[in-house]
Image (cartoon, rainbow, N blue to C red):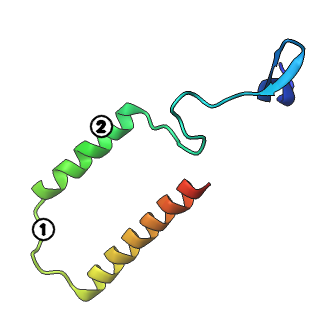
Amino acid sequence: MKEKWERDFIVSGGSMAPRKPSVGMHPTWFQLPHLFVAIATAAFATIPLLPFSARFSLRTLLITMTAIAVGLWFIVWMAQG
């Protein structure tokens, strides 16, 4: 098993050079499996087919808006690294 410094660096011509990220990839990007994206899309596509009441209480609205705000904050927090 290689040491951490051996995994983080490559040896070329006797000198140590940091490993570069993949071409076109920003180092803070993350990857998702295609199956996860497909399942999430299918789940969101079925939401309009579910029966629901056209009336929402103020409490439901506030809880939903809070959940959306926390989700967006988490995405921004993860993107900043």
**Quadrant location of residue 15?**
top right
The crowd level at tag 2 (other Cα within 10 Å; few <14, some 14-19, many 20+) is few
Q: Disc 1 residue type? A: Phe
The crowd level at tag 1 (other Cα within 10 Å; few <14, some 14-19, many 20+) is few
Q: Earlier in the sequence, mark 1 or mark 2?
A: 2
Q: Residue 69 vs residue 5: left or right?
A: left
* Residue 21 screen position, x and y as percent: 62, 31
Residue drawn at point x = 30 percent, y = 86 percent: 59
Q: Disc 2 residue type? A: Ala
Q: Residue 71 vs residue 61: left or right?
A: right
Quarter that holds the N terminus? top right
Q: Nearer the viewer, mark 1 or mark 2?
A: 2
* Residue 24 screen position, x and y as percent: 51, 32
Residue drawn at point x = 30 percent, y = 40 percent: 39
Q: Which residue is mark 2?
A: 38
* Residue 55 screen position, x and y as percent: 12, 80
Gap between marks 1 and 2 measured at Cα: 24 Å
Q: Which residue is mark 1?
A: 52
The dot on residue 36 is none
Q: Nearer the viewer, residue 54 or 2?
A: 2
Q: Residue 61 vs residue 2: left or right?
A: left
